[in-house]
Amino acid sequence: MADSLLTMIYPARPPAAAPVPPTLDVLLAGTVFFDLVFTGFPVPPAPGTEVWTEGMGSSPGGIANLAVATARLGLRTGLAAGFGDDLYGDWMWSVLRDQEHVDLSRSRRFHDWHTPVTVSLALDDDRSMVTHGHPAPEPITDLLSPPPRTRAVLADLGDPEVREASWWRAAARDGALVFADAGWDPEQQWDRRILTDLADCHAFTPNADEAMGYTRTTTPEAALVALAEHVPLAVVTRGHKGVIAIDSSTGERAAAPSLRVGAIDPTGAGDVFAAALVLGTLRGWPLQKRLRFGVLCSALAVQQFGGSLAAPGWGDLADWWRVTKEHAADGRADARETVTHYGFMEECLKGVDTRRVRRAEATIARFSDADAATDEPVAQPALRYPPPPPRPDGPPSTR
């Protein structure tokens, strides 16, 4: 009787609702460009001249570089971006949504707004770019109020709009790990307020020059130590010298050398490294393994044309591992050393979707074969096109 009376006065509380699991692994927001990349210049272009190049590729660029890189590693990727209603916008929307399986539910198509376009000239180990575009009709950050639940966020703090936006901080408060970059400061003022913004971030991944600029240090190693005071995971990339990092959350410090490859286009290599770092962090890999995996993904990317569509998938990684082991078995000393350092790839490749991606052949008129799943390596045919008619003022075609 007493228990019944107490129940009437103090009814039992309903059970707490179970926490909603994140719907995404990675959330991104920014500008998507139509990228047209030219490579293989016999000489740099000069005013009043025409230069015929050996290679060309086109792809979704800008923030799409990161979106494709993370999606190809199997991470559930959401992108908030504006798309024009022109042919470029149609093609990039289809590539990202249908081919690369990027979630565009937070993206918008804008009527009568043309897609930003970038022409990239890959010259030696660097590149030059020419871009045309206009601001989106509406702020992209409005599409993320509130942001969907996600395990990680990639944010460019070098973009003032991103730094001032609240969506990535809201995601961090909801448990997301924020991986930040800042990019090159063309005026080289290196605004130190960016270091203050790192308080809401898990990781910061600048290159060596950027790291030294923001920390006012004179060596990459000193910059790394300074950055480790601001974020749990500090990473400094050093191009052909590899990468160094400190993870204060685990007490690890590690370095990984670069892999020697024939690089033809560096576009998007840093984005590919960041995607690999996110994957390794979400999987709880040791720091050394995360760095070597990032170096490997970047090395595969720079051997292909075209930014985002040069990002490797698991099929490309599986092919590289198979060939490297074959070379090691044939007695090549460099391959044997690589197999020793990358033995973890055997475990990584178990049970993954090894889709092959025709990366170098991506143009606006062609989709990749990323959906052609197979368990065996596929040799991609070299595409050949009929040469253009001869021009009286230009050299004969070598295509």
Image (cartoon, rainbow, N blue to C red):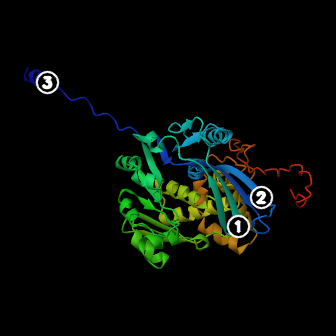
Q: Residue furthest left?
A: 2
Name the mark on residue 55: 2
Residue 175 relative to residue 236: left or right: left
Q: CA distance from mark 2 to mark 1?
A: 12 Å
Q: Pointer 3: residues within 10 angstroms few (<14), some, or many (20+)?
A: few
Residue 242 % position (x, y): 57, 71
Q: Quadrant of residue 2?
A: top left
Q: Earlier in the sequence, mark 2 or mark 1?
A: 2
Residue farthest toward the front in the current orientation of the protein: 48
Q: Earlier in the sequence, mark 2 or mark 3?
A: 3
Q: Position of residue 348 (x, y in %)?
A: 58, 55
Q: Residues within 10 Å of mark 1 (few under 14, many from 20)?
A: some
Separation of residues labelled 1 and 3 (CA atoms): 78 Å
Q: Nearer the viewer, residue 144 or 395?
A: 395
Q: Quadrant of the N terminus?
A: top left
The percent coordinates of residue 367 (x first, y second) are 72, 43
Q: Residue at x 47, y 76 (%)?
A: 221
Circle nearer the N terminus (1, 3): 3
User: Camera-side residue: 29 or 384?
Assistant: 29
> What's the mark number on residue 123?
1
Measure the C-alpha gap from mark 2 to mark 3. Answer: 77 Å
Find out whether the residues at labels 2 and 1 contact each other: C-beta distance under 8 Å: no
Q: Secondary structure at mark 2?
A: strand
Q: Nearer the viewer, mark 2 or mark 3?
A: 2
Disc 1 residue type (three-letter):
Leu
- Do residues under tags 2 and 3 come within 8 Å of each other at their CB atoms? no
Say which residue label 3 marks.
7
